[in-house]
Amino acid sequence: MIGKGAYLRQLTAATVPMKSIEVGKELEGSSPPSVFIGSWNYPDVYAGPMIAPLHGDTAIMDMPESWIPGHKTQEEIMQYRLSLVRGKHKINISDLDNRFVEKLQEISLSAGSVESEVSFTVQPHGMSFSEEHTPFGPSAPIERFEIESVKWNRDLEKVFYDSDLRSAEAVPDLHKKGVPFSSIQKAFSVGTMGKDARRHLVPTRWSITACDSIIGDHLLAEVKKFPVIDTWRVHEFSSLHNNYAVILMPTGWQYEWSEAFLHVMGNEELVFSDHEGNRKKTVYSPLGGCYYTCKMAVLEALAQEKKQAGAIILREALQGYVPMGVFNVRENVRNAMHQPVQEFEDIRSALSHISEKFTLPMQRFIEEGALLRNTIRERQCTLRDFAPSSPLHDTNTGM
């Protein structure tokens, strides 16, 4: 069977849902604030700002935390992102002592949008879609780059000037203070955190997973100290052509992320799954950044409630879905965890409830999900209970 990475590359190549904005070689506008650090040719990467040809407050264009609570449509989000023009300049990740990187750091630490001027060597063109990072519009190498004076976010500023504070301490501390994840990640990516000698640029897609993992590890240490829930719980949420179901189990921490892609490109029905037990994974998940961002979002909610649970999360992406970055998972799962909870006596009744909403029969998730399958067996259910021909699926009308 095709792997998730290969499938998403095919999907992304086939996804050209809208046109990106057209600009010339000279651009005056506002950065939300936003920067992008590429990973190609690491450690000599292409870094630069992302600027909209608009003036004033453009924060909404790079604030994923606000899109789903604000009921933004997929088309609105893509319009925001494809209006951002990416400037590129090749630089070594350790070369922080120059004015270009300092400008990127000022943008990332800014408390608001930043008025900017850019000249490109050629007219920007193209666009970028990915399951790992949010989309952006045309790009081109930078010839000249200027920004107006910037007022920094106070919490990010304190971290920047504390060159003895490790990133592993700074990131969860900023999260605890309520600094938006997107702001933490951008500051992390431009080398403004960590002990002074170890600071460097971090490619955007790597920095997203790094921040998810750092926050998730910190939250897990807290959650393991809390009492275990005493019922089976289900939280659900749907948006942006995705359905999500979070099953919380009355067990110590264990975690599984399963995702299905159903007829997004044609007739495909693909399911991918990965899991961990009480100890975190020691190798990078083949499911990529989604695995870590979902884990963080669930642990965040458990820590707020001061409870511990096992977690199995099911996701299905349906026709119309477009890869727009792992924010799609993080913010949808966050919103799922804030929906009214449904409580059940056992795993069978929880799955029966979910099957009434989901398009894919539960049997497919069970076949791919080792933790889900083992949980069913431990609870003395049989896999036949969840076969598509059983009464469990008689009322499955989709969502």
Image: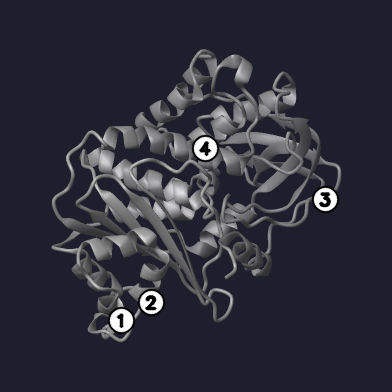
Labels 3 and 2: the sequence-earlier one: 3
Q: Nearer the viewer, mark 3 or mark 4?
A: 4
Asked whether 230 or 290 is in front, the reply is: 230
- How did the renderer colour the structure? one colour
Q: Mark 4 and mark 1 in contact? Answer it, CB < 8 Å.
A: no
Amino acid at dot 4: Ala
Amino acid at dot 2: Thr
Label 1 belongs to which residue? 396
Labels 2 and 4: the sequence-earlier one: 4
Indicate left or right for 22 with 294 as reference.
right
Label 3 belongs to which residue? 123
Labels 3 and 1: the sequence-earlier one: 3
Asked whether 43 or 82 is in front, the reply is: 43
Label 2 environment density (alpha carbons within 10 Å; few <14, some 14–19, many ≥20): some
Mark 4–mark 1 Cα distance, whole angstroms, equals: 38 Å
Mark 3–mark 2 Cα distance, whole angstroms, equals: 45 Å
Q: Quadrant of residue 248?
A: bottom left
Mark 2–mark 4 Cα distance, whole angstroms, equals: 33 Å
The numbered dot on residue 258 is none
Indicate left or right for 33 with 345 as reference.
right
**Helix or strand or loop: what does disc 1 sit on?**
loop
Label 3 environment density (alpha carbons within 10 Å; few <14, some 14–19, many ≥20): some
* Residue located 27% across and 38% down the image: 303
The numbered dot on residue 210 is 4
Asked whether 330 or 260 is in front, the reply is: 260
Question: Residue 296 location in percent, x, y?
Answer: 39, 43
Q: Mark 2 and mark 1 in contact? Answer it, CB < 8 Å.
A: yes
Q: Is residue 335 visible?
A: yes
